[in-house]
Amino acid sequence: MSDEPFSDEQKQYLSGFTFGADVARAVSGLPVLSGRAAPAGSMLSVGGGGADLNGQVLPVGPERIALQAQADTEKSGRKLCKEELAKRDKNPLDMWDEIVARSKAGQFPKGTDVFLTKWQGLFHVAPAQDSFMCRMRLPGGVLHAWQFRGLADLSDVSAGGYVDVTTRANLQLREIPADQAANILYGLRELDIVTQGSGGDNIRNCTASALSGIDESELIETIPLAKRMHHHILNHREMFGLPRKFNIAFEGGGRIASLDDTNDIGFRAVRVDETNASDDLPAGVYFQLTLGGITGHKDFARPTGILLRPDECVDVAGAIVRVFVASGDRTDRKKARLKYVLDDWGFDKFVEAVEADMGTPLRRVNANRLTPSNAEDRLAHVGFHRQAQAGRQYVGVVLPAGRMTSDQVRGLSDISQTFGNGEIRLTVWQNLIIPHIRDADVDQVKAAIEAIGLDHDASSFRAGLVACTGSAGCKFAASDTKADAMRIAETLQSRFQLDEPINIHVTGCHHSCAQHYIGDIGLIGCKVERGDDMVDGYHIHVGGGWGDRQGIARLLLESVPSDEIPEVVASVVGGYIEKRLGNESFTSFAKRQTIDDLKTLLTVNA
């Protein structure tokens, strides 16, 4: 052994590793090794042999991490928010009998039970609608024709007779009466569709590249990884103890973006070429780990410097979630996301805690050794496109702001089963894909899609249109987003033609389900004073993007009444077409203009 003292770098690593080991032992109820006194309320201040403030012994199982975090919060003199108190008083996963009993009695939940019922996927959305919305878990956005048809039948009997595609490549049923709640849950389980943990303080539907396995430009298939993550979540109880919701995405580097940089955890595929390989880093495809995306709070997932083999991703994600469960804010819902732990701790400290949880260091690789993919095509999710498989195509079906009637769902199921392999794939762009269509059948598929009142082609405005549920079905929304989004698209496509999409994201409230900050044009609902009345309206943002165009949109106009919005947006687009340089994208155009310059264009084009 060398007699040389440790270098500063070695001392820093050992200190961080010891801290991480203390974190892992503390959340497991074991004494810390360093002997250092932990600050009150920290993850390390377990104390009392695992007893909470009331002298009750905390359980030894996986739930202990969340319960210990709650106990530590109170020991530090801070007050748990009402949602944390509700979760501590009643485990939301143990409410099945209550939900069934209320359904039999035709009753909606009250008080904090409204919040806790979300753990089974049921959202009471009053006063927008005196009904439930039900959200599902469809890992990677994949389901089969028989399931899709079953959802249509279930919606006709127990919901509103339509199905919505969400911005997490997922599905929702709406207008569910109180007495149909149990029938929805039973019916979904009989279709092999899971709802557990699809709402509330849980990890939401795990997304992946929609063309996984059929895109010749992708680096790696990601739907299998999303499915593995899905099963990991369902079979680890600590994954349900989060202080707030959580998003995970796998990006395979193909033509349709999964928006991984907007997620709490993003896994982005990259290649290590032979020229950058080494004995400890063989050439091949890996995943870059990014953390902390939450664009509703104006932040993208940031690189950690960690590079993972595909088979390491799920275990690392589990460790990240466990550290977040132990460290997230349980006093303020607005600060209870991973971003704020990272802002407080810094990335190095957080990654050290993850390494301690796993009991092994993670692989750090300079980004200069990595080759990313640049294959994204913003029109690849609509229309017919060739697959990697010879003689086969997929079609991206255009849905009006993500909504289908039950009859349309049955029609799409028939098309998938007759002309494809019976598979339906949802995208984060609120549409769906039917893969594995033979070249010889394309014309028949076009006719079949048109016959059910849908389209296989879209203008550059419809292709990039995203809208949340809005005030027609969400109690938080200030405006009728789906209806307004369609009016905007109709106005624009009647006046302009573009060679690439302009993404228009229309969201109803600060929760930003339609991610308005990453749209070329992003609208967020508000109420606008007009005379003695308050009417629906929007604040307008411009210049957002993701991936290579990453950026948070800037505020352009405030409090525009919704009936004026189509003309105002048309004025913005008209100014862009008139003043852009060559084939300049809207995002590039908007970024090189000052807000005052853009407002001048509005005046010119008024």
Image: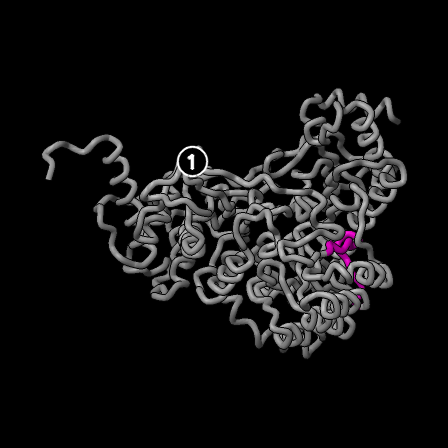
**Which residue is pictured at 69% across the width and 42% down the height?**
378
**Residue that badge 1 annotates:** 369
Q: Return the x and y of residue 481 as percentages of the image width and height.
A: 78, 48
* Amino acid type, callout 1: Arg
Q: In this view, does 55 lie to the left or right of 504?
A: left
Q: Return the x and y of residue 342 as percentages of the image width and height.
A: 45, 40
The boundaries of the magenta stretch are 395-406
Q: In this view, does 285 lie to the left or right of 596?
A: left
Please indicate, yes or no, whether residue 523 appears anywhere in the rendered image. Answer: no
Quadrant housing the N terminus: top left
Please indicate, yes or no, whether residue 289 appears anywhere in the rendered image. Answer: yes
Q: Return the x and y of residue 260 as percentages of the image width and height.
A: 56, 46
**Which residue is pictured at 50% across the width and 46% down the height?**
269
Quadrant housing the C terminus: top right
Instruction: Say if 11 sits above or below 356 in the image.
Output: above
Picture quadrant where residue 299 is located: top right
Instruction: Say if 107 sits above or below 82 in the image.
Output: below
